[in-house]
Amino acid sequence: MKNILVIHGPNLNMLGRRDPQHYGTLTLEQLYQALIDAFPMLDFTFYQTNHEGEIIDLLQDACDQPYDALLINPGAYTHTSIAIRDALEILTVPKVEVHLSEVDNREPFRHVNVIRDVVDATFAGRQLDSYLEAVRFLEAKAVV
Ligand code: DQA
């Protein structure tokens, strides 16, 4: 069974309490379950952390693990973290970036994206559907 590493960054553990217009109403657990239900033939390994260094540790550890792909929503670190960008560059499996909200149509500081050009594709603005599209993209590329 193909295994996708799924990493969520800061404040995404608070889904369900964040602005539903941007982030929808699902909790992170419900979002995990929706992925499992939509892709029963795939194995997902889920992590969420509020700490930048922990995301980097997870990405470094993933270099030595048999993951087939990475799906990452780095939250606000998307817009600031050169360190996460550098760690993503080291990891060689196919990588997709996902956002619940349409970051390019929000505040100008969210238009800065320091990781977009080190991932294979970005899916944003469609809440849960951003995630479903991202996994379908990996399926279409025969990665998973
Ligand atoms: C987010 C967008 C980021 O700008 C924000 O800081 C988040 C969530 C999204 O999924 O839409 O925490 O990554």
Image (cartoon, rainbow, N blue to C red):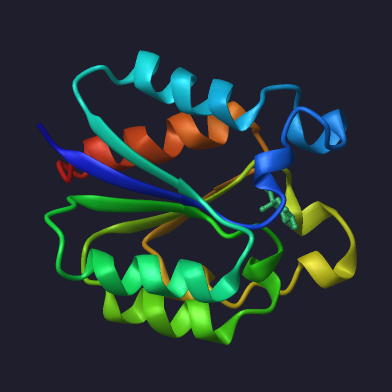
Q: Is residue 59 above or below residue 104?
A: below
Give residue 80's quadrant in the image.
Answer: bottom right
Instruction: Indicate the position of residue 132 as horizontal and vertical percent values.
Output: 45, 29
Q: Residue at point 78% right, 65% down? A: 110
Residue 58 placement: quadrant: bottom left
Judge by depth and name the residue closer to the eye, 133 or 93. Answer: 93
- What residue lies at 49% left-to-right and 69% top-to-bottom? 54
Q: Quadrant of residue 39?
A: top left
* Residue that appears at 81% across and 38% down: 22
Quadrant location of the N terminus in the rendered image: top left
Give the camera-side residue of 46 and 42. Answer: 46
Observer-nearest of 140 and 55: 55
Q: Quadrant of the C terminus?
A: top left
Vertical arrangement, residue 134 with respect to residue 129, above or below:
below
Q: Nearer the viewer, residue 133 or 23?
A: 23
Please indicate whether residue 77 sits to the left or right of residue 82 in the image. Answer: right
| Residue 60 x/y as whole percent | 30, 74
